[in-house]
Image (tube, helix red, strand yellow):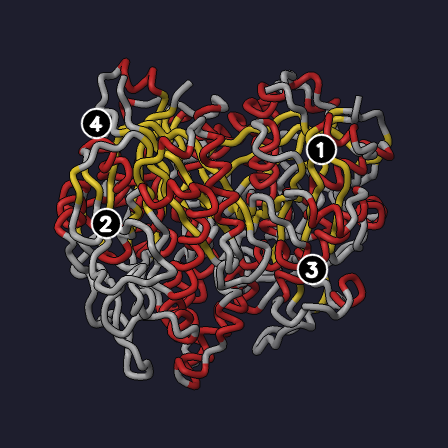
Amino acid sequence: MRVVVTGLGAVTPIGTGREDFWTSLLEGRNGFGDVTSLDISGYKVNRGCELRDFDASPYFQRQDPNSMGRTSHLAVAAARMALGDAGLDADSYPSERAGVCIGTTSGEPLVIEELDDCIVGECLDESDKHFSYRYPCHVIAAHVAREFELGGINQVIPTACAAGNYAVAYAMDALLAGRADVMLAGGADAFSRITYTGFYRLGAIAPDICRPFDLNRSGMIPGEGAAMVVLESEERAQRRGARIYAEMAGYGLSCDAFHMTGPHPEGDGAARAMRMALKSSRSNREDVGYICAHGTGTKASDKAETKAVKQVFGDGAYQIPVSSIKSMLGHTMGAASAIEAVACASTLSEGKIPPTANWETPDPECDLDYVTSGARDQQVEVVMSNAYAFGGNNASIVLKRYRG
Amino acid sequence: MNREVVITGTGVVSPLGDSRGEVHEALCAGQTALKSVQGFDTPGIEPPLAGEIADFDPVAYLGSRNLRPLDRTSKLLTTAAKLAAEDSGWTAEMLAEHDVGLVVGTMFCSAHTISQFDQRGLREGPSRASPLDFANTVINAASGQAAIWHKLSGLNSTISAGSTSGLQALAYAVDMIRSGRATALLSGGVEELCYETFFGFYNSGSLCNSPGRDQPMPVPFDTRRNGFFLSEGAALLMLEEAESAAARGARVLAEIKGHGSAFDCRSSSRADGHSELLADAIVRAVQAALDDAGLTAADVQAVSASANGSRADMTEATALAQTFNGQTDRLPVTAIKRMLGDQLGAAGAMQTIDMVETIHDQRLPGIHGLEDVEGTLPGSVSDLTREFEVETALVNSVGLDGNCCSLVIAAHS
């Protein structure tokens, strides 16, 4: 059985909806700006990739968006777009055979931030009453399931910034194991004071723009967003005449077991995940025509990822286009690799590779082909998408061009 | 899918003991974990009651090496991992040499650390927030920290599905082993008791000691029940592919035969009392687990219910009565949250571990203090600890947001 991607939905700092987002990616548009959703006066950096003017209400039909946190809003919006893109609604799948799996870094951080405001301001009342049922991150998948009548598997995989890939991988396995007929899978994270403060304290936020793999790269830029993909069996997709973007072919997961917030300096764990992903997808390393990098724009992460790619692909690494779309939309945390999965599926179906934007100066330690002069027209057969996270988590997925 | 999954060891940190034997004895004796909380200040509430591991001393288990970066949730999990590894015969060297993975269910993970990190930034300015604490604010912090401590380089997943998280984590791990993506996984759940979650549940009115209650009555299935009590702990099982476990000469405690899950997507909000829609989802999860195990309801000889003393216990009772189709009179059902409290994300794994012990010693803990049974399970629930033959058992986990998960375990054949 082959698992295929038949629907794509994304809410990102550079565009909402598959087409908008894809157009922005190919144009190399930046999503950075001054931070507006939190009081930035105590910080020495002021750079974020927020979703401006995002209105959740058009995406809800069965629930009150005011009864839940912002991450759920983003997830429901992306899910509605993905299902619409796939030509599916609740009448087109048996509810008990349809499931959802969502990755996240922080879950519903604004709910606990509201509680903290109240604790510090000594005004505990309502926020404390709904904390226990609005905060736990599983509610994100619960809200998506209620909105679209998904009565099967329901899970959140909060494996930080690699979570989107974990979710897509798990959804693939659920289909292969016969536990579902249709799976929505992706990631979501809302812009958060806690996250912003944390990366600020790690000295990881770039003061101006994000420049992955550039010698003068100065960090990442925290963002927010969500993306969902629809996965189903090839047979089911063909039977209903669905547009098939790509095959979800395999994945690899590993743990550095080395450091909570930094990568293994040689990229050993990342390399193991990539090798497993190749094996799991029955791909040879020569087949890979594009690597969608984790590429956050920090010194350590980009260097370790480059080393890991060379470990796995040897001299062939120099022939493979590698780009980081975080150069444009910042780091959307648990949504990042889900958004990247949308980009990868589009790359395979459209024959275009998105660029690494903002790149100017070569780094001798980052010497691969980073697609630095704009999007590239190139038909690709196999893509690998990497995601790395706090906790030393590594997750690589492999998507293949679908030829019927 | 011929690869079978066996349980070769368990690790437990709980208010009723730190081994499955000790916890099982306490459960069978009807001991309760409910007592006054010491770990945090509780302005305006006298006395705050919960299932706290008041004397938890991680140094006693782990030594003092490399503990500083770990918060309480991480320490609980890392300790359970140590105990599970030892129980299953995995030495530290073996763990470091093989790609052993970790799959952890949790509902809140490090909510206390997250809140403290944020509060410090608010009170003293963002430049005073602690980068060391920030590492523990991600929801997979505990599994990351435990992996570093034990050098677990295999897959590292965290699963959140409300209070079904622990059982869902086991289900995830089973599929990973069956599909050949892993051969040995530590899997289960962790949850800490902290100010934030305690007061959250306290003020939402869910607890047996929430405002307005005369006397705590966390007795599942009893007409007098008035809510659950919050508890904490970590529970991990070493799951291994059967042939690989046999090849290393491992002792096998039990087998995991199958699992199933379902979600109640039709209820408009979380369950507050009895819900037919949630009952339907529970029935589907149990049936899916039985199908996955290649068994029928008639094969099940004991059930560990999710019931915790909430009004919603009736929903699970209805679902079990429906699944076992009038056979519940001969089917003993326990609900160990009566004694242990609700360990949320750790609960399903803790239930599973205790059922392993029930299969071992053929005793099912009674539901302490149960007198006046409501509804559909009169013949199957009892306040008495019962002895009988049990080889195949069902573990059930239900979350009030609609998550349902069931697991079938059996004696090793």
Name the residue: 75% across, 44% down: B10
Q: Which mark is residue B333?
A: 1
Q: Tell which tag, 2 or 3, sits nearer the viewer.
A: 2
Asked whether the viewer can see residue A118, the reply is no
Label 4 Cα crowd, 10 Å radius (few <14 / some 14-19 / many 20+): some
Query: In this image, B200 relative to B45: left or right?
Result: left
Mark 1 → mark 3, Cα distance in angstroms: 22 Å
Residue at the disc numbered 3? B51
Query: Mark 3 falls within which chain?
Result: B
Residue at the disc numbered 4? A87
Name the residue: 83% across, 32% down: B249
Mark 3 residue element: loop
Query: Mark 1 falls within which chain?
Result: B
Query: In this image, A358 relative to A75: left or right?
Result: left
Q: Tell which tag, 4 or 2, sits nearer the viewer.
A: 2
Q: Nearer the viewer, residue A263 or A321?
A: A321
Residue at the disc numbered 2? A371
User: Mark 2 and mark 4 in contact (Cβ < 8 Å)?
Assistant: no
Label 3 Cα crowd, 10 Å radius (few <14 / some 14-19 / many 20+): many
Q: Nearer the viewer, residue B271 or B125?
A: B125
Mark 1 residue element: strand
User: Mark 1 and mark 4 in contact (Cβ < 8 Å)?
Assistant: no
User: Mark 1 and mark 2 in contact (Cβ < 8 Å)?
Assistant: no
Image quarter in which the C terminus of chain B is found: top right
Quadrant for residue A288, please give it.
top left
Query: Mark 2 falls within which chain?
Result: A
Q: Given the image, on which type of amino acid does mark 3 rest? A: Gly
Label 2 Cα crowd, 10 Å radius (few <14 / some 14-19 / many 20+): some
